[in-house]
Amino acid sequence: MPRRPIAPTRSVTRRADATLIAAVAALLLGAAPPRPPECRAVPGDGDLGAILAGARPGERFCLAPGTYRGPLRLDGVVVWGPREAVIRSAGEGTTVRMEGHGAALLGVTVDGSGGRFDLLDAAVHVAGRDGRVEDVAIRNATFGILVEKAERAQVRDNDVIGDAAKSLGLRGDGIRLWEAYDCVVEGNRVSDGRDVVLWYASRNRVTGNIIERGRYGAHLMYSHDNEIVENRFVNNVTGLFVMYSRQVTLRRNVFAGAIGAAGLGLGLKESGNVVATDNAFVHNTIGLYVDTSPLWPDDRNRFERNAFRLNEVAVSFLGRASGNAFVDNEFLDSRVHVEVDGHGDARQAEWRGNLFDDYAGYDLDGDGTGDVPYELRSLSADLVAARPELAFYRGTLALSLAEAIGRIVPLLEPRLVLVDAAPRMGPGSDARAD
């Protein structure tokens, strides 16, 4: 039967609404957090470095608008101010170092850092326990916020802007967690940096952030038991890459605009027990890239109720596909739904209840499930797998014509890539958007 048009599902529409709301919220960043009680006032021309040198842990300092010279060291103290209170780098080293227990930097602007990558010169460096960086604007720094060898740090509602004029490799990371545990990274806007990094960092929650125009929106390596929830990875080379990590939860994120030859919305390499639900993969070169994942025989990855829309390739496997389950996902408006590099197929993965916009079956009993299995075959994917240089022609009339020939001429029938025995015929229930 001819392919019928499929309207955008309510889940995708609501995700788009959420993206707009998040963008509007980001414009509101800049209001200072509440002034701490029992706060010692510091005038705009005060020597903040000397004042902090004599401070005791637990003291609170409230800055007036003005410029304060770094570097500063916060050993268990709280520094609050409006955005007009600017802590300016002296031109070398890290501008603000937070140490001890309960140090906090709230509301101010940090302008600049040193320029050495080998020393990780940063606007703000957080160590110790229960540190907080909230509602801070960071400009002109090599690295933005570094959280290293820290526990229970909170990095919330900050605005970290890199240098868009520099090439990606010459920018520093916007936010980096290294050997950091039980931390929260929430509500930040990170733009024009290199990466947001979680390395050797476990039991952290990354939620509600907007990360855009970087190399890796976020990059996990050897980082286990992390939650990545309701973030917007937009116009990065790669939205999120998870490497050598286990027990990672990905929920209600948007991976969009990762285009170009290296464009990936989400990549997995040798990672297991990854659960990805209710995410949107929109307008990427490859929506989801799976490289030898899961690695360990007893691990599993599960992809459920995700929307794949307008990608060149929705899902791409490098190596085997076994150990992965795809349940109740939507594959709409992509040039290729699933491909496998080399000459393999994806039949060892579990495919159940997915919606494919090129399904040509029928539903005579009206139960919402196709009465015949969905089978994916792709001559163009076969050609690219056999001759990788042909990937240059993705999106051109030449490969589109090859795909059409593969469907029309039985002698050129390509290999079977996947089978979904119970394909879904229409949009899912409203529950997936709630």
Image (cartoon, rainbow, N blue to C red):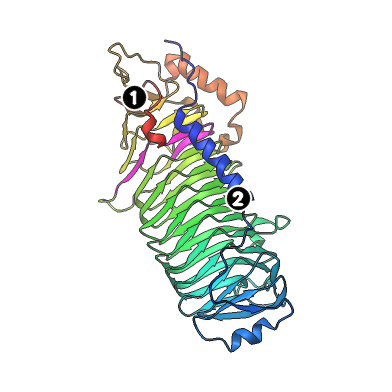
- Circle 2 sits in a helix, a strand or a loop, which is it? helix
172 lies above or below 392: below
Q: Magenta residues?
A: 300-316
Main SS of the magenta part reads: strand
Residue for point 71% across, 58% down: 166
Residue bearing the label numbered 2:
26
Is the C terminus in the top left, top right, bottom left or bottom right quadrant?
top left
- Judge whether residue 431 is colored magenta: no
Report crowding for label 1: few under 14, some 14 to 19, many 20 or more residues within 10 A (C-alpha).
Answer: many
Which of these two is toward me, 77 or 210? 77
255 lies above or below 28: above
Q: Do we see residue 235 in this rendering? A: no
Which of these two is toward me, 45 or 256? 45
Report crowding for label 2: few under 14, some 14 to 19, many 20 or more residues within 10 A (C-alpha).
Answer: some
User: Which amino acid type is marked by label 1?
Assistant: Pro
- Circle 1 sits in a helix, a strand or a loop, which is it? loop
User: Which amino acid type is marked by label 2?
Assistant: Ala
Where on the picture, by quarter, is residue 133?
bottom right
- Judge whether residue 307 is colored magenta: yes
**Can you give x and y, in whole percent of width and height, for residue 173 in the image?**
59, 62
Residue bearing the label numbered 1:
423
Which of these two is toward me, 376 or 210? 210
Residue for point 48% across, 52% down: 241
**Can you give x and y, in whole percent of width and height, for residue 420 in the image?**
32, 27
Q: CA distance from mark 1 to mark 2?
A: 39 Å
Q: Nearer the viewer, mark 1 or mark 2?
A: 2
**Can you give x and y, in whole percent of width and height, for residue 290 in the image?**
42, 45
**Can you give x and y, in whole percent of width and height, for residue 207 in the image?**
47, 53
The answer to whether mark 1 and mark 2 are in CB contact below 8 A is no
